[in-house]
Image (cartoon, rainbow, N blue to C red):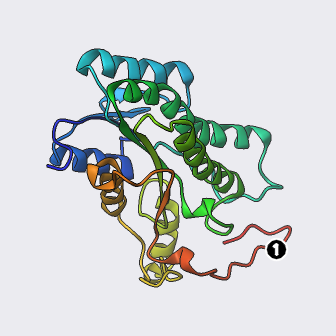
Amino acid sequence: MRLHGKIAIVTGAGSGIGKATVDLFRREGATVIGADLKGADVDCDAGDDAQVKALVDKVIADYGKLDIVFANAGISGGLASIFEQSVDDWTEILRVNLIGPFLAIKHAAPHMAEAGGGSIICTASVAGLRSGAGGPAYSASKAGVISLVKSAAQQLTGSNVRVNAVCPGLIETGMTEFIYERARAKGQEDRLGHLNPLQRGGEPAEIANAALFLASDEASYVNGHALVVDGGLSSSHPYNSQRFGRTAI
């Protein structure tokens, strides 16, 4: 019961990493409010200022405190190149993936600070560390998340509010379903995750475990950090050909 008595919000809770985290946090003793566009406890657009503020305010009103926020909601945007994506594509991807975590920090951290501390975790990605692990807008948004948690941790100095990111590698979720389905259709399922030293893709529960650590008191001295959970993929520089005029596969 590592989160006994804690009150937590998890966004993107309708499936994948978010759902696995909600289930795990509850098993560890937390009261968890799962938020998503649909399929969770609360309907919320994680990239909408008014909706995020209303969610945080409701949790404070209902429970009197907020100890943990996992700003996990995100969208992929596909693998189209810079030259194939529109401004609208970039705007929406950045709105959900980067502005969403910003809003979670903006609205949750003051309540946490007033109560004496808390933990905010944001989902970034190995795609935010270097190119080749996602589309350009997605990668840029996740690089922004990594920078955001560092800036937020500094701006919350003295508050005892910790802000960290988790950086998943290839995880089987709704976002990556097309990759898994394509590999299985070609009889190449054994190739999934073959570039990392563990030579497999990850499971949502493995990211949930990392989020649990960052949310718990066991990570009491971890702050402004991007925790990579990718089977070792980012320990090297796997070769990925990306030629002008051709979408990378």
Amino acid type, label 1: Arg
Q: In this view, does 31 lie to the left or right of 192?
A: left
Q: Position of residue 14 (x, y in %)?
A: 36, 41
Q: Which residue is drawn at 66% across and 67% down?
A: 130
Tell me where residue 155 sits by quadrant: top right
Quarter of the figure that contains the C terminus: bottom right
Question: Is 180 located above or below residue 104 in the figure?
Answer: below
As drawn, 37 above or below 97: above
Secondary structure category for the residue under label 1: loop
Seen at 39% across and 17% down, the residue is 57
Total tally of numbered discs in the picture: 1
Which residue does the numbered mark 1 point to in the structure image? Answer: 243
Of 55 and 185, the residue lying toward us: 55
From this viewpoint, is residue 153 visible?
A: yes
Residue sitting at the far front: 158
Q: Where is residue 46 in the image (x, y as percent from the top left)?
A: 50, 32
Foreground residue among 82 and 225: 225
Picture residue at 27% right of the left edge, 49% below the top: 217
Give the left or right position of residue 232, taking residue 40 as reference.
Answer: right
Is residue 125 shown above or below 31? Answer: below
Pointer 1 local density, CA inside 10 Å: few below 14, some 14–19, many at least 20: few
Q: At which x and y percent is residue 117?
A: 36, 35
Front residue of this view, candidates 47 and 65: 65
Say which residue appears at 52% left-offset and 76% top-offset: 233
Could you tell me if residue 71 is visible in this image?
A: no
Q: Place residue 13 in its image quadrant.
A: top left
